[in-house]
Amino acid sequence: MGTQLIERGMRIGECGMRWNAERPDVVKEVHQAYRNAGCRLITTNSFGGSRSMLERHGLGDKVADWNRRAAEVAAEVAGADGWVIGDVGPFGDFLEPLGDTTVAEVEAIFREQISALVAGGADAILVETMSDPGELCAGVRAARAVTDLPVIATYAFQKCAGDYRTLMGTKVAEAIAAAYAAGAAIAGANCGTDLSLADYVELATEICAAAAGRPTIMQPNAGAPHPMGDEVRYDATPEEMAQLARTLRALGISIVGGCCGTTPAHLAAMATA
């Protein structure tokens, strides 16, 4: 969503949530492009929609309105046979003891955002791109406290000395187990620091082993990012992502999608595959 809105004129660093209210036609256009590509799960434009993130732009009073609108805009596109996935990203700081925010405080932050997404028509909640299992579990618990909708939970992993870990150093098995224990219906990974397509295959193998038959999700980037001046480009072609999608399904991943750099063309190839 972020890279697609930037291509349509959003400035880097601008509050993307603002577009739900002021440019809903453009957000809807992005959703429609992915729906046309064959995507059945449409993720709301609300990654930075928590109060703690919106307050960085002086917009903390917009949490309820803009998150509800994010879900409404996605619902207009998803249709009767699609699903609106209410997107919840990191709250933007560290939990105690590394930071000053308590678990209770971050759960309250997430409950506020998730309640608005549910009010707008979300069919499930996605707590994503998490580096700290403590924060991810707080997000899952917050969702479970305000809705009976399914909760999807995903981490961003990186490769460290041959192991896949979160930024906080948590290995895959421990991280995935924590997500299910907190109440996630589906767990897995999205994004990944400098991971290759082969890395995502290895990561998916570990996730499926940790899930032990429970539903899983993988949303890889379109390969590793490469800075090109003021832009960041991803090197995986639609054909390569299509092959990756087939491999992920064969490994047992339940839901396949895409994160950074995956355009409608990538997702169309993956959906067909």
Image: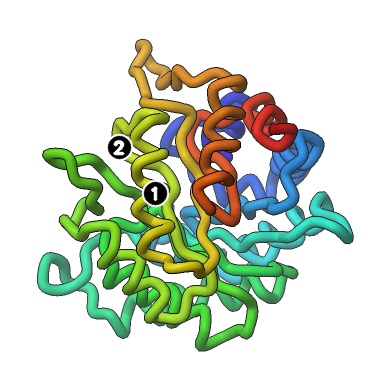
- Locate residue 177 relative to residue 44 in the image: left or right: left
Which quadrant: the C terminus? top right
Q: Which residue is mark 1?
A: 205
Query: Mark 2 belongs to which amino acid?
Result: Thr
Q: How is the image coloured?
A: rainbow
Q: Which residue is mark 2?
A: 193
Q: Is the residue marked by circle 1 packed among few (<14), some (14-19), or many (20+) residues within 10 Å? A: some
- Locate residue 105 relative to residue 63 in the image: left or right: left
Comparing marks 1 and 2, which lies closer to the viewer? Answer: 1
Residue under the image location 49 percent in, 21 percent down? 236
Residue under the image location 43 percent in, 68 percent down? 212
- Would residue 153 be visible to someone looking at this image? yes
Residue under the image location 61 percent in, 63 percent down? 86
Residue at the bottom extreme, as displayed: 145
Q: From the viewer's perspective, is residue 39 above or below residue 267?
A: below
Foreground residue among 33 and 17: 33
Mark 1 vs 2: CB contact within 8 A: no
Callout 2: SS: loop
- Would residue 60 be visible to someone looking at this image? no
Q: From the viewer's perspective, is residue 235 above or below residue 162?
A: above
Query: Mark 1 belongs to which amino acid?
Result: Thr
Residue at the right extreme, as displayed: 80
